[in-house]
Image (cartoon, rainbow, N blue to C red):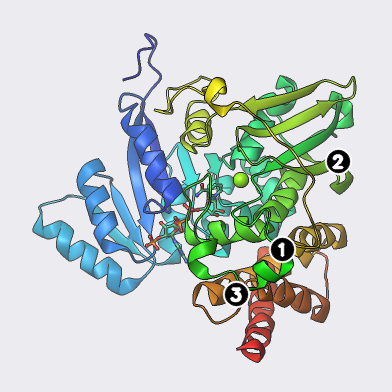
Amino acid sequence: MDNSTNQPALQQVTILGATGTIGLQTLDVISQHKNRFSVFALTASSNVKSLLNLCQQYSPQYAVMLQAEAAAELSRQLKAVGSSTTVLRGEASLNYVASHESVDVVMAAIVGAAGLHPAMAAAQAGKRVLLANKETLVMAGNLFMQAVLDGGATLLPIDSEHNAIFQVMPLRRSNNISESSLASVGVKRVLLTASGGPFRNASLDELKAVTRSQALNHPNWVMGPKITVDSATLMNKGLEVIEAHWLFNALPSQIDVVVHPQSVIHSMVEYIDGSVLAQLGNPDMRIPIAYGLGYPDRLTSGVSSLDLLTTARLDFCAPDMIRFPCLRIAYEALNLGGTAPAILNAANEIAVEAFLAEKIGFMDIPYIIESVLSASEIESVESIEQLVAVDARARLVATVQMRALC
Ligand code: NDP
Ligand code: MG
């Protein structure tokens, strides 16, 4: 229960990707603050069973399913239990519930490029956008940050590293997330921590033999399958470098990655005077989610206290870009600029999907991404329509590369 005495008005929340790991953890935090938040809409792609269950628990005004058959089935089952939730379907409906005038807060937690349009819709409509979907910034960082400014939206990063950096940035900058340069607020660089994933100490030969189930076994975090594989290849950290570039107006040379296996320090900011500020906590996404929901207030999240005596050690080492080429390729795509990060993202999504389907090996993932990038023309980013076309083209090239390996 929320114990504060001056209760703000009930906030209406849309959760995009409600059936995913971030979506479910968001609902967990919301359930702890029912006098502060109300669920307006929940969305999913095809998981009828989970969305039905969530609709019964949270009685949203709308439930949206991407897939038409799944929407029809959900609608039938909700009617059978006497629910008043309206079921909508398709991409346009995702944008509708992300930008609806009754909505205050949008949790953008769809996985992959599919999350771009509804996140843009929420930004353009001036919502408080809790951004978990890092692919939005990787694909369309400049357009998304402009939409946040033009729409008067409040952007709060949910990715734990970026949330940590946001928390330890100077206050005047947090209020105006990407406007000024880092140097102008006395920041020298940001340090993104990386757990190193399950294969931190594996040799190149061992990495070549990694199986799907080994890659899905992350040591510290429970996450959806795509980001879990991204964490194992270190592409997740590469995507996060690009995400940090856009969120904090940081130059590539101002973003460093440090491997920290305990995942207790969630990231750091170094100031020009040599001070380094870090945010620590147990590795549980309900911390950044509660921060985003409550900002600028602090809310309880249900996460237990960090026990430093049990943690005992905090270790650090440099990332190995030879065994984990995805991180190097992501820095290169950021330095190339323009459409390069969107191409990287699309190729990665195809490669990870193929790896999860056990069609290619673990080390084929960076090979495919690098081949697609070198076969593609890099353009400057002009519009979302252009990025959608670039994304589709890169997926085709990646599919050809992937088939050649099968
Ligand atoms: P999950 O795979 O667990 O969940 C994905 C959600 O998106 C599900 O609700 C799924 O619906 C829905 N979805 C999938 N494809 C589509 C589509 N094409 N259109 C609409 N909805 C779709 O992912 P996570 O919760 O792990 O991650 C979500 C995002 O948050 C990712 O971008 C990830 O990088 C980011 N993130 C996640 C973290 C984590 O700890 N999990 C940490 C930091 C960032 P259905 O269930 O029906 O398939
Ligand atoms: Mg992260």
Quadrant (top left/top right/bottom left/bottom right) for the N terminus: top left
SS at circle 1: loop
Rendered image quadrant of residue 389 = bottom right
Q: Is residue 145 above or below residue 331?
A: above
Q: Which residue is mark 3?
A: 350
Amino acid found under the numbered disc labelled 2: Gln
SS at circle 2: helix
Nearer-the-camera pick, 222 or 337: 222
SS at circle 3: helix
Q: Position of residue 284 (x, y in %)?
A: 49, 37
Q: Gap in Å between the C-alphas at discs 2 and 1?
A: 29 Å
Estimate how packed mark 2 is, as few (under 14), some (14 to 19) or many (20 or more) residues with alpha carbons within 10 Å.
some
Q: Is residue 303 visible?
A: yes
Q: Position of residue 353 (x, y in %)?
A: 54, 73
Which label sits in the foreground, 2 or 1? 1
Q: Position of residue 282 (x, y in %)?
A: 52, 31
Q: Position of residue 344 (x, y in %)?
A: 72, 67
Please name the residue shown 64% across and 45% down the image: 195
Q: Which residue is mark 2?
A: 254
Amino acid found under the numbered disc labelled 1: Ser
The disc placed on residue 203 is: 1
Estimate how packed mark 3 is, as few (under 14), some (14 to 19) or many (20 or more) residues with alpha carbons within 10 Å.
many
Say if mark 3 contacts mark 2, CB within 8 Å.
Answer: no
Amino acid found under the numbered disc labelled 3: Ile
Quadrant (top left/top right/bottom left/bottom right) for the C terminus: bottom right
Rendered image quadrant of residue 381 = bottom right
Please name the residue shown 29% across and 69% down the image: 70
The disc placed on residue 238 is: none
Cβ(mark 1) to ligand 2 < 8 Å?
A: no
Residue 184 appears left or right of 6: right
